[in-house]
């Protein structure tokens, strides 16, 4: 039975210290792990004692030992993938050498992994580290204790393979630990650690400033300004939660389920509440209308749909490791959020245009100026969002993920940065001041009414 590289089960739980507890490796099965690694020289953060290596401590046991058998371990950089496997008569790429392939001269020995330029050992192909665990005769156990140094930055693979049917089922125990110069955090995720630390500091500063302004003008506060404070608090909670999650991951090698769940919930709540807040502002709630009326149910329905789609996308993005999902599957997870974002923006700008027109007709100049500035902020964010989504879709559809591993984090970080920028602009436009009441639900006198009142006073 051939093994297709594209069908390999990528074992990538939320950890970088993988523990095997009597897990059965059956014949004609290959386990694969894929992790981004920095070299010590190229790492963005390191200490004097930093190392870049993978530590293997594995035990293999055959419950029913019979004839000879073999388990193989391979460790290699993603650029070496082309050296592995052979193509059968059906055009499929297989990693294990079969009797048929060996007879056709496609590989040297059946029951082993195919490494072109080598075949059985790793002396002639230094780019692929190979370790054989043979079972000779009645031998029922084997072991591997090794440390493999990382000599090139990039995505690395570790394969555990049982290509020979005669090997039988093998129970695997022990652990593998992937150490980057900065700690256990995979290289493709490391940039999130300083990023969320910086975001937490920015949100803390903004929250302290906003609370101070609200306390100073507490007698004139608008409901909208209270809601803005709640959104800032959600942003701070999200940034702190993700920073703590990545910090613990980097220190201990594993991610707890609770921090991931809290981070996803905080992210979903922040994005959903903030979008709903922007929508009701554009609809003129509290400015040109006292209630939303029948529109409130549609606003809630869109908010629920976005919250569910965003939560599913965030869980898939944060529980799985980089490149675990295929490009089409990753695109499928992005598209629902993209469509709902388009609906949000379409409704936002439609409602904002109607509100600006209503304020212009009523000659409410203070509110009109505020909403026009707000429209410029939304337009800039929409253009930036469209540009980023186009770039992201193109990158996921065209570029090999193993080659763009070091920059994929930018796609997620961009949305956090853009969100904070828009929130900062909203805070500036609706900051608590002594003139708060001019933005409340009440009509200002138009220019003609003011002129008539002045003439009446003169008379």
Image (tube, rainbow, N blue to C red):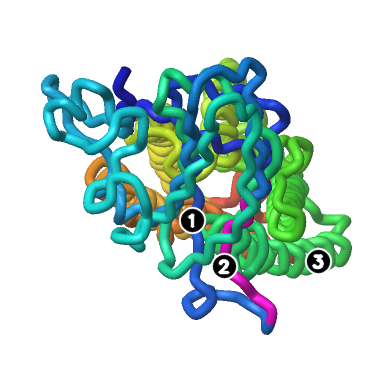
Q: Look at discs 3 and 1 and give the one toward the viewer.
A: 1
Q: CA distance from mark 3 to mark 1?
A: 38 Å
- The residue segment tinted magenta is 49-56
Q: Mark 1 or mark 3, which is nearer the start of the sequence?
A: 1
Residue 430 visible, this orientation: no
The quarter of the displayed image where residue 127 is located: bottom left
**Label 1 belongs to which residue?**
36
Q: Nearer the viewer, residue 286 or 305?
A: 305
Q: Nearer the viewer, residue 40 or 120?
A: 120
**Measuring 38% from the left and 50% from the top, which residue is drawn there?**
385
Q: Farthest residue toward the bottom?
A: 48
> Is label 2 in contact with label 3 (beta carbons under 8 Å)?
no
The circle drawn on residue 52 is 2
Q: Mark 1 or mark 2, which is nearer the start of the sequence?
A: 1
**Label 3 belongs to which residue?**
208
Crowding around mark 3 (Cα neighbors within 10 Å: few <14, some 14 to 19, many 20+) is: few
């Amino acid at each position: 039975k051939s093994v297709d590289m594209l069908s390999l089960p990528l074992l990538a739980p939320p950890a970088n210290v993988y523990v095997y507890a009597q897990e059965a490796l059956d014949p004609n099965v290959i386990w694969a792990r894929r992790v981004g690694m920095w070299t010590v020289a190229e790492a963005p953060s390191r200490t004097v004692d930093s190392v870049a290596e993978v530590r293997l401590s594995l035990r293999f046991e055959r419950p029913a030992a019979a004839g000879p058998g073999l388990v193989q371990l391979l460790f290699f950089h993603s650029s070496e993938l082309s050296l592995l496997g052979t193509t059968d008569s059906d055009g499929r790429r297989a990693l294990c050498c079969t009797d048929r392939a060996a007879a056709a001269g496609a590989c040297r020995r059946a029951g082993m992994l195919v490494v072109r330029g080598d075949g059985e050992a790793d002396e002639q192909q230094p780019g692929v580290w190979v370790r054989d665990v043979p079972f000779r005769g009645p031998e029922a156990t084997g072991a591997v204790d090794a440390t493999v140094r990382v000599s090139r930055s990039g995505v690395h693979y570790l394969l555990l393979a049982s290509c020979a049917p005669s090997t039988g089922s093998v129970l695997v125990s022990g652990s593998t630990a992937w150490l980057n110069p900065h700690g256990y955090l995979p290289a493709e995720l490391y940039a999130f650690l300083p990023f969320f630390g910086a975001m937490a500091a920015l949100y803390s500063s903004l929250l302290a400033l906003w609370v101070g302004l609200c306390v100073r003008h507490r007698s004139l506060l608008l409901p909208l300004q209270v809601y803005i404070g709640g959104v800032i608090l959600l942003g701070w909670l999200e940034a702190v939660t993700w920073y703590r999650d990545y910090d613990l991951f980097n220190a201990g090698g594993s991610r707890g389920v609770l921090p991931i769940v809290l981070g996803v919930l905080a992210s979903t709540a922040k994005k959903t509440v903030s979008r709903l807040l922007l929508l009701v502002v554009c609809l003129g709630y509290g400015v040109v209308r006292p209630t939303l009326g029948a529109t409130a149910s549609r606003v809630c329905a869109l908010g629920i749909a976005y919250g569910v789609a965003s939560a599913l996308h965030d869980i898939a993005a944060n529980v799985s490791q980089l490149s675990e999902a295929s490009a089409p599957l990753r695109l499928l997870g992005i598209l629902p959020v993209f469509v709902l974002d388009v609906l949000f923006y379409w409704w936002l700008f439609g409602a904002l245009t109607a509100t600006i027109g209503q304020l212009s007709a009523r000659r409410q100049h203070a509110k009109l100026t505020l909403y026009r500035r707000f429209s410029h902020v939304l337009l800039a964010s929409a253009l930036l969002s469209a540009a980023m989504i186009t770039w992201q879709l193109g990158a996921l559809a065209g570029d090999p993920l193993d080659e763009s591993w070091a920059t994929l984090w930018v796609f997620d970080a961009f949305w956090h940065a853009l969100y904070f920028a828009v929130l900062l602009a909203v805070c500036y436009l609706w900051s608590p001041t002594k003139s708060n009441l001019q933005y409340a639900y009440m009509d200002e006198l138009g220019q003609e009414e003011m002129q008539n009142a002045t003439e009446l006073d003169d008379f």
